[in-house]
Amino acid sequence: MEAYKAHSFLTVTALLIFAVSIGFLVSQFQGGLTGAVVTVDGAACSANTECNDYLACTVDSCKNAGLTNSFCSYAPIESCVSADGCCPAGCTTVTDSDCN
């Protein structure tokens, strides 16, 4: 009987860990694996400010703002430009003041 209780406890614990892990992954990717975006009001974004990914080396923008087919775009910054907060790969302190 004791082995059955231990087995049941381990099964419940494993299922709980699995459920929490799936919830964590879904919250992290938020549709990023498939490209899908879940929206409540029908539009993913209505302004560029709603698309901030908090990464210095991307240009964040809202495409088709306010429409049902709107989406956030995060284009990587690849040019060496001073004072934009980004030091892309291949840039140096000589070509981009943001590189330290």
Image (cartoon, rainbow, N blue to C red):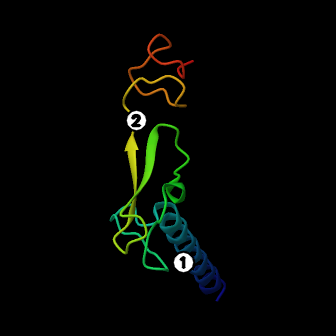
Q: Nearer the viewer, residue 95 or 47?
A: 47
Q: Nearer the viewer, residue 87 or 67?
A: 67
- Type of amino acid under label 2: Ile
- Type of amino acid under label 1: Leu
The residue beneath circle 1 is 15
Q: Is residue 96 above or below residue 15?
A: above
Query: How many residues crowd around disc 1 within 10 Å: few (fewer than 14), some, or many (20 or more)?
Result: few
Q: Is residue 98 above or below residue 94?
A: below
- Residue, x 48% and y 68% (percent of image)? 26
Query: How many residues crowd around disc 2 within 10 Å: few (fewer than 14), some, or many (20 or more)?
Result: some
Q: Earlier in the sequence, mark 1 or mark 2?
A: 1
Location of the C terminus (image quadrant): top right
Of tags 1 and 2, the one toward the viewer is: 2
Instruction: Measuring from the top left, give residue 99's x and y in whole percent.
Output: 53, 20
Q: Secondary structure at mark 1?
A: helix
Instruction: Measuring from the top left, give residue 86's x and y in whole percent.
Output: 50, 30
The residue beneath circle 2 is 77
Instruction: Measuring from the top left, give residue 59's x and y in whole percent.
Output: 44, 43
Q: Secondary structure at mark 2?
A: loop
- Residue, x 53% and y 52% (percent of image)? 52
Label 1, label 2: how many angstroms apart (C-alpha)? 42 Å
Residue 67 position by quadrant: bottom left
- Residue, x 42% and y 19% (percent of image)? 91
